[in-house]
Amino acid sequence: MCLKTLCGHLTLGFVMLLGTICAQGADYPKPEEGTWLVKDFRFHTGEVLPELKLHYMTIGAPSGEPVLVLHGSSASGQTMLSNDFAGELFGAGQPLDASRYFIIIPDAIGSGKSSRPSDGLRTRFPKFTYEDMVLAQHRLVTEHLGVRHLKLVIGQSMGCMHAWMWGEMYPEFMSALVPMACQPTAMSGRNWMLRRMVIETIRADPAWNNGNYSEQPPSFRLSVASFNLATSGGIQRLHHIAPTREQADKLVAARLAQRFVADANNYIYSYDAARDYDPSPNLEKIKAHVLAINSADDERNAAELGILDREIKRVKNGRYHLVPASADTRGHGTTGDAKHWKHLLPGLLSEAPMPGQ
């Protein structure tokens, strides 16, 4: 059973990862993996980690125009290699053709093969925020990979929020930004409330034991499944695949039967890291050409609030594209399917030249 059959049933990260398995092999070079060890990394709290491990993948030759691809919460760079994303973008003749672009896909702090609480420190791991994560990405790109300017920063969900922060923290460093599936305003409302509910549910489980558990707390799997059903999948899509109670029960049963290998502390850190996210005061600082993309059925970033319609006007070279909702979209996960918006990339990239071009 391949991605098109399962995509409505699974969480965004798992859907995108499954796409890499089901795909017959997209027409782009094999990703090269690397790890950079940063000595004495200082977090915004003043805490210092003697050695921070930053894992990343690259696709294409370093001589190409650099593109930074940023993943979502509790995921990893691997999830950006799905057939629906990488398979639509990185191949020959596609918008981010790896023969022309040097594609960089890092694992954020706390995710993938980068340093995480589960590596041993558990709740003694520094309490990082998005500021720390973006700083680490910038140091990886500049100090380790030697990149002086990015053609594009593109990110989905958490990666979307990171992209807005990149545009403000390093306004001269990129030509274009594509933040997808987020808002350029403070973490709040339904998005933050449901994150808090997941975190508090895990912490209230006696098996969590203040983060010193020997097995994953039983509430962890259930709280994550509830969060994902409530915040991703798309209302029309879920009704299309589960129009009866019996079919809905089968979907829930399938969701709960999925292999679950996440770590509770990693999850808490990842979702709590958004606590002070708020790029809204500094949107006018962004100099890159911005194409912000959301979907009309995004459960976490409701289009009817009109937030992006309002805020994008403050970005000098910004525009906003809203993907219409349908039975083919997946709510918060919609932008992980590049077919809905990839036609917009060539125009953006052509109007946002690299320095000296």
Image: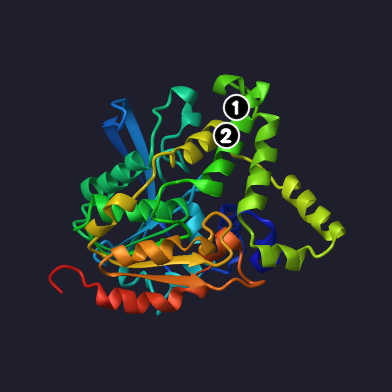
Q: Is residue 351 above or below residue 219?
A: below
Residue under the point 34% across and 33% down: 52
Q: Quadrant of residue 238?
A: bottom right
Residue under the point 29% across and 64% down: 315
Residue under the point 52% across and 64% down: 303
Residue under the point 62% across and 53% down: 11
Residue 94 seen: no
Q: Are the two marked residues, 2 and 1, in contact with CB atoms closer than 8 angstroms?
A: yes
Q: Is residue 266 above or below residue 18?
A: above
Give left or right: position of 335 versus 145.
Answer: right
Task: Tell me the SS state at disc 2.
Answer: helix
Q: Is residue 193 above or below residue 104?
A: above
User: 327 and 120: which one is in front?
Assistant: 327
Q: Distance of mark 2 from mark 1, alpha carbons?
A: 6 Å
Q: Amino acid at mark 1?
A: Arg
CA neighbours of label 1 inside 10 A, class few (<14), some (14 to 19), many (20+): many
Residue 16 seen: yes
Image quadrant occupied by the C terminus = bottom left
For disc 2, the marked residue is: 199
User: 310 and 134: which one is in front?
Assistant: 310
Display coloring: rainbow
Image quadrant occupied by the N terminus = bottom right
Q: Amino acid at mark 2?
A: Ile
**Coordinates of residue 255 in the picture (x, y in percent):** 72, 50
CA neighbours of label 2 inside 10 A, class few (<14), some (14 to 19), many (20+): many
